[in-house]
């Protein structure tokens, strides 16, 4: 191999010597640059067990086809996985008669657990070639698992043309074109290297692409006049290579061409062997188009297969597809796709088979595959009525896959069909509204959803209005909230109680919540049907303890069978409800779970919210935290709720550092000079911190901002207002009787009161107030504020009592989670299943935690971990 020594050495260093911990690496490069050759070279040099998969263009729409190819040699190990993981993986491969609800999270976790179990037998290498052609379900499961490998002796190498589908954060190496010296060396190594002007022509045309150097050199040897034609035909390099390979294919004997066409159509060595028989097309091997090994017939490069496939008329390709279809009748999905590829005109029989295939894909968790199949089925439907139905279903699956632009295209095509019924048009518009949200078109999305709410049947109308209310809350503008409330007034009276509660919680101003809070309690006492919706409404209405209780129940109900993508609401609200109520360790735990679910189901806003919640906890605990990225993301989303939350967290982080001007600079964005809030709810959560920053920096505070809180129904907001007024020199208000529901904010108020009492030399009054604040800060491990309280107590002549020992404080967040679950009696496998980790990672974290805790084993954890 010429010119790839550096890349080979870098990747070989990951496998030789075999690793002690996991490594994931991506090899990136255009077609022909040698990704497969490098990957093969590394695999051959690795003294490790290897599992390999190559993405196939023809299998992109077969859900979990790639993952099945990778894990087929080890499927006998699947039954030993934890029950729900084994069921999820076998269901994904359609290897069980027991119907299993599709769950990307459980499938990814099953892959992680299986790979970790294999690594217990010895180091493991996993190679994924042509990852850009792996079906979306397989790629999602593999990248989910790869990102969670930690201490396992596993190396995962992925080769791809485009790394975008792998998500951010994976280390990688990009293959560049060969430099002129290496290109010349490779050209000289060819059987008939060109010389003189022809050599320069090849070097110029190939532009450092190794495959191009080889193929152009061979073409020139066969036809010395080719170089002159190249100058007159300025084709892109890939097109020129495909054309050269097609010429070589066309020069083969007819029977050999037939065999290669069947192999190209099958696009699988196993299927090709079934359809072509035992013949070895030796002329094709000599021409360098294929290679044959124990696994069967392989094209030397994906471009070779493409050249063969497209070198013949459609009629010949269709006949080949029909012949291959007959050999895969036992594989309904492949059978349907080959029939579809052979169809040159609408065919309801084939469309119906595709629709059945889509149902299979969706049951196994392949939402993107199901959408593609239904889109093709719609194209083959003779009846426009069937086209509409299938396009609308495809849009639903594309929405489940998080493909906003695709949803818009599919739903838009529904609106162009005259056969679409009014209800179908409304459903299509609702999906377009979702896609507009995905694309950041807030105003258009809100108009779309409100128009659907005003015209659809009750169930669809309430769903659209609830989504519109979510948007209005995110934006926080009076115009958006007013539009949603006016739409609510036009909704039918009976039914929709929980949705109505959510809409009002989202859109009403803080001073308008009294009757809505009463309705919340009525629904909570009666027993809500949708705990996520009602719990989230309780969170917005500052009924935080109720919110935590309902949202915990909702999350527990989702965890056991698997999230199935319906967890976005609870995983957005619960971390913040835990944060507000002083359950900071739980907030970190749920935020981690939210990030895992967001990765599996492509819920980017959920991940962003979880990351910001983690930043808030870390900031208040005095850990070094950078909030700039969160601010940039919030500003990019153009939602005031996200921006206000990010500004508040950035201000608290600056407070923790003692950087009061920086804190003021962030918090001042929460209100304008007239006291109008940036966001109608989130801004008020930072009003007392803004007052503290204004006082410490001598900068102005927008006093009109306090007026709306006088009528606020929430004890939380009244407590925040009392703290702000006290800081600004007004009378010190007593804490709200219910204020301890928000312990950090309550302790901040007590600290400010204690500081003021001490300055007024009311030492005896200040001592118990400061001691109360200190105890809360110590319990929360809010170190910067605990230091302030200790300093105030020393100024009162009191030596602050040391914090009650918390042996868990020395653990990382993940170690703390694992120790708490182990103390409750869960096994390593059960903890791994709960936290989406491998059992080996759990065991390692426990082993490293014992010395920090001063214990010898898990049997001592129960007495160590506080019940709370």
Image (cartoon, grey):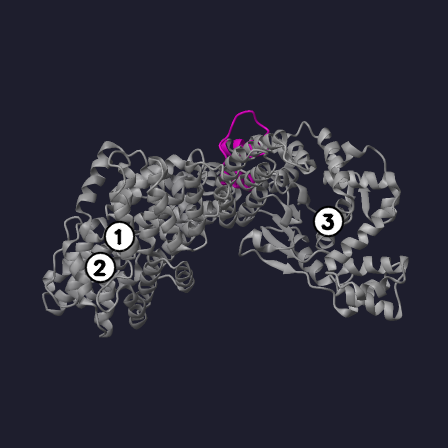
C-alpha distance separating marks 1 and 2: 34 Å
Secondary structure, mark 3, is helix
Judged by depth in the image, the label closer to the viewer, 1 or 2, is: 1
Q: Mark 1 points at which residue?
A: 482
C-alpha distance separating marks 1 and 3: 56 Å
Which residues make up the magenta segment?
Answer: 84-112
The answer to which quarter of the image holds residue 499 is top left
Judged by depth in the image, the label closer to the viewer, 1 or 3, is: 1
The answer to which quarter of the image holds residue 375 is top right
Residue extending farthest bottom:
698
Q: Name the residue under label 2.
A: 748
Secondary structure, mark 2, is helix
Where is residue 693? Give x, y as percent: 25, 68
Where is residue 91? Give x, y as percent: 55, 31
Towards the viewer: 828 or 531: 531
| Magenta part, dominant SS | helix
C-alpha distance separating marks 2 and 3: 64 Å
Membership of 72 in magenta stretch: no
Viewport quadrant of the N terminus: bottom right
Q: Name the residue under label 3.
A: 302
């Amino acid at each position: 191999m010429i010119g790839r020594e550096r890349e080979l050495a870098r990747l070989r260093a990951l496998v030789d010597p075999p690793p002690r911990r996991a490594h994931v690496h991506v090899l990136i490069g255009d077609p022909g640059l040698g990704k497969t050759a490098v990957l093969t070279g590394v695999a051959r040099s690795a003294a490790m067990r290897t599992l390999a998969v190559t993405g196939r263009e023809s299998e992109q729409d077969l859900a979990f086809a790639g993952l099945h190819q990778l894990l087929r040699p080890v499927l006998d190990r699947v039954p030993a996985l934890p029950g729900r993981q084994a069921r999820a993986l076998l269901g994904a491969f359609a290897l069980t008669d027991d119907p299993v609800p599709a769950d990307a999270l459980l499938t990814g976790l099953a892959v992680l657990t299986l790979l970790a179990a294999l690594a217990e037998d010895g180091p493991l290498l996993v190679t994924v070639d042509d990852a850009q052609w792996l079906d979306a379900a397989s790629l999602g499961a593999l990248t989910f698992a790869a990102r969670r490998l930690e201490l396992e002796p596993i190396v995962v190498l992925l080769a791809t043309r485009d790394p975008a589908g792998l998500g951010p954060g994976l280390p990688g190496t990009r293959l560049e074109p060969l430099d002129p010296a290496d290109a010349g060396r490779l050209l000289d190594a060819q059987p008939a290297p060109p010389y003189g002007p022809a050599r320069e022509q090849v070097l110029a045309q190939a532009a450092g692409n190794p495959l191009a150097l080889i193929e152009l050199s061979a073409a020139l040897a066969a036809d010395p006049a080719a170089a002159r034609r190249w100058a007159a035909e300025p084709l892109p390099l890939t097109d020129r290579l495909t054309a050269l390979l097609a010429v070589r294919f066309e020069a083969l004997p007819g029977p050999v061409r037939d065999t290669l066409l069947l192999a190209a159509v099958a696009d699988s060595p196993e299927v090709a062997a079934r359809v072509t028989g035992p013949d070895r097309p030796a002329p094709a091997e000599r021409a360098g188009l294929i290679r044959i090994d124990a696994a069967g017939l392989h094209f030397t490069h994906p471009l070779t297969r493409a050249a063969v496939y497209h070198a013949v008329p459609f009629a010949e390709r269709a006949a080949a597809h029909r012949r291959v279809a007959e050999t895969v009748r036992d594989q309904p999905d492949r059978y349907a796709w080959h029939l579809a590829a052979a169809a040159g005109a609408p065919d309801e029989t084939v469309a119906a088979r595709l629709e059945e295939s889509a149902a299979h894909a969706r049951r196994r968790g392949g939402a993107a595959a199901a959408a593609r199949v239904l889109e093709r089925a719609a194209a083959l439907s003779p009846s426009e009525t069937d086209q509409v139905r299938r396009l609308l279903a495809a849009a639903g699956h594309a929405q489940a896959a998080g493909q906003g632009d695709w949803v818009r295209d599919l739903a838009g095509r529904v609106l162009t069909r005259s056969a679409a019924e009014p209800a179908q048009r409304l459903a299509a518009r609702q999906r377009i509204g979702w896609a507009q949200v995905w694309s950041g078109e807030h105003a258009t999305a809100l108009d779309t959803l409100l128009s659907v709410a005003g015209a659809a049947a009750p169930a669809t109308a309430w769903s659209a209005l609830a989504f519109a209310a979510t948007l209005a809350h995110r934006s926080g503008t009076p115009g958006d909230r007013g539009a949603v409330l006016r739409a609510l007034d036009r909704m039918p009276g009976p039914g929709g109680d929980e949705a109505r509660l959510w809409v009002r919680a989202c859109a009403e101003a803080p001073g308008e919540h009294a009757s809505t809070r009463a309705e919340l309690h009525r629904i909570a006492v009666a027993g809500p049907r949708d705990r996520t919706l009602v719990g989230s409404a309780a969170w917005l209405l500052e009924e935080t303890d109720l919110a935590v209780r309902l949202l915990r129940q909702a999350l527990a109900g989702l965890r056991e069978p698997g999230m199935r993508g319906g967890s976005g609401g609870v995983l957005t609200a619960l971390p913040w409800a835990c944060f507000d109520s002083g359950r900071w360790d739980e907030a970190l735990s749920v935020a981690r779970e939210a990030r895992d679910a967001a990765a599996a189901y492509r819920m980017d806003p959920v991940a962003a919210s979880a990351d910001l919640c983690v930043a808030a906890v870390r900031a208040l605990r005095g850990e070094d935290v950078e909030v700039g990225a969160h601010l940039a993301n919030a500003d990019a989303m153009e939602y005031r709720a996200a921006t206000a939350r990010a500004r508040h967290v950035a201000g608290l982080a600056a407070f923790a550092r003692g950087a009061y001007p920086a804190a003021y600079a962030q918090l001042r964005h929460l209100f304008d000079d007239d006291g109008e809030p940036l966001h109608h709810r989130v801004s008020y959560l930072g009003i007392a911190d803004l007052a503290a920053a204004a006082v410490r920096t001598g900068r102005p505070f927008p006093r009109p901002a306090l007026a709306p809180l006088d009528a606020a129904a929430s004890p939380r907001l009244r407590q925040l207002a009392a703290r702000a007024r006290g800081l600004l020199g007004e009378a010190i208000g007593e804490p709200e009787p219910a204020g301890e529901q928000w312990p950090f904010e309550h302790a901040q108020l007590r600290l400010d009161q204690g500081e003021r009492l001490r300055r007024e030399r009311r030492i005896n009054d200040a001592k118990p107030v400061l001691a109360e604040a200190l105890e809360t800060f110590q319990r929360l491990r809010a170190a910067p504020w605990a230091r302030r309280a200790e300093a105030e107590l020393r100024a009162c002549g009191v030596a602050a009592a040391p914090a009650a020992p918390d042996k868990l404080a020395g653990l990382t967040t993940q170690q703390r989670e694992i120790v708490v679950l182990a103390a409750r009696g869960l096994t390593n496998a059960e903890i791994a299943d709960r936290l989406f980790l491998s059992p080996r990672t759990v065991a390692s974290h426990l082993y490293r935690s014992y010395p920090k805790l001063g214990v010898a084993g898990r049997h001592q954890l129960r007495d160590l971990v506080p019940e709370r």
